[in-house]
């Protein structure tokens, strides 16, 4: 039984990044509307390289949405949630390299939120 477990676990261990994944998250208060926010987020994320498998998922009542995409060159993803009823916008950047993930997070934070 032990040998079977080791055999099954070996491929999983090979794909695990030491110390990762890394995730950085922040949120702000925002009174911007859903359509305007999503348009800006889509444009800025593409400019930053987050353009692979991009999609926007709307809540059941279509009052809020989450946009997410993968970076074209790095193993990093971006997720932005826009919730006008709660007047919040949050971003999360996740990746397997701490330095790259953090730098992309800082860029996303600055470009999406400015000096909020």
Image (cartoon, grey):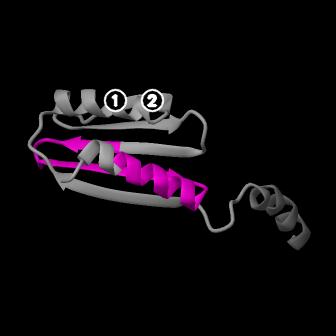
Q: Is residue 21 visible?
A: no
Distance (Cα) linking label 1 and label 2:
9 Å
Marks 1 and 2, the one that precedes in the sequence = 1
Q: Which residues are magenta?
A: 80-108
* Picture layout, residue 92 above or below residue 84: below
Is disc 1 in contact with disc 2, using a CB cutoff of under 8 Å? Answer: yes
* Disc on res. 53: none
Q: Nearer the viewer, mark 1 or mark 2?
A: 1
Quadrant of the image occupied by residue 26: bottom left
Identify the residue under disc 1: 42
What is the quadrant of the N terminus in the image? bottom right
For the point 31% across and 43% down, which residue is it? Answer: 111
**Label 1 crowd (10 A; few <14 / some 14-19 / many >=20):** some
User: Could you tell whether 84 is left or right of 25 in the image?
Assistant: left
User: Could you tell whether 16 is left or right of 102 in the image?
Assistant: right
Where disc 2 sits, the SS reads: strand
* Picture layout, residue 52 above or below residue 64: above
| Nearer to the camera, 81 or 113 | 113
Residue 40: give x, y in percent of width and height.
Answer: 26, 31
Where disc 1 sits, the SS reads: helix
- The residue furthest bottom is 2
| Nearer to the camera, 30 or 57 | 30
Q: Is residue 112 visible?
A: yes
For the point 60% across and 45% down, which residue is it? Answer: 75
Query: How many numbered marks are there?
Result: 2
Quadrant of the image occupied by residue 19: bottom right
**Label 2 crowd (10 A; few <14 / some 14-19 / many >=20):** some
Residue 103: give x, y in percent of width and height.
Answer: 47, 54
Query: Is residue 82 within the magenta segment?
Result: yes
Residue 95: give x, y in percent of width and height.
Answer: 55, 52
Identify the residue under disc 2: 54
């Amino acid at each position: 039984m032990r040998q079977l477990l080791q055999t099954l676990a070996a491929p999983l261990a090979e794909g695990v990044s030491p110390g990762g994944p890394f995730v950085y998250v922040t949120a702000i208060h925002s009174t911007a509307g859903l359509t305007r926010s999503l348009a800006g987020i889509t444009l800025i994320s593409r400019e930053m390289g987050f353009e692979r498998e991009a999609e926007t998922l709307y809540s059941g009542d279509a009052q809020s949405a989450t946009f997410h995409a993968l970076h074209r060159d790095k193993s990093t993803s971006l997720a932005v949630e826009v919730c006008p009823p709660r007047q919040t916008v949050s971003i999360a950047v996740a990746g397997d390299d701490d330095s790259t993930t953090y730098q992309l997070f800082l860029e996303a934070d600055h470009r999406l939120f400015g000096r909020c």
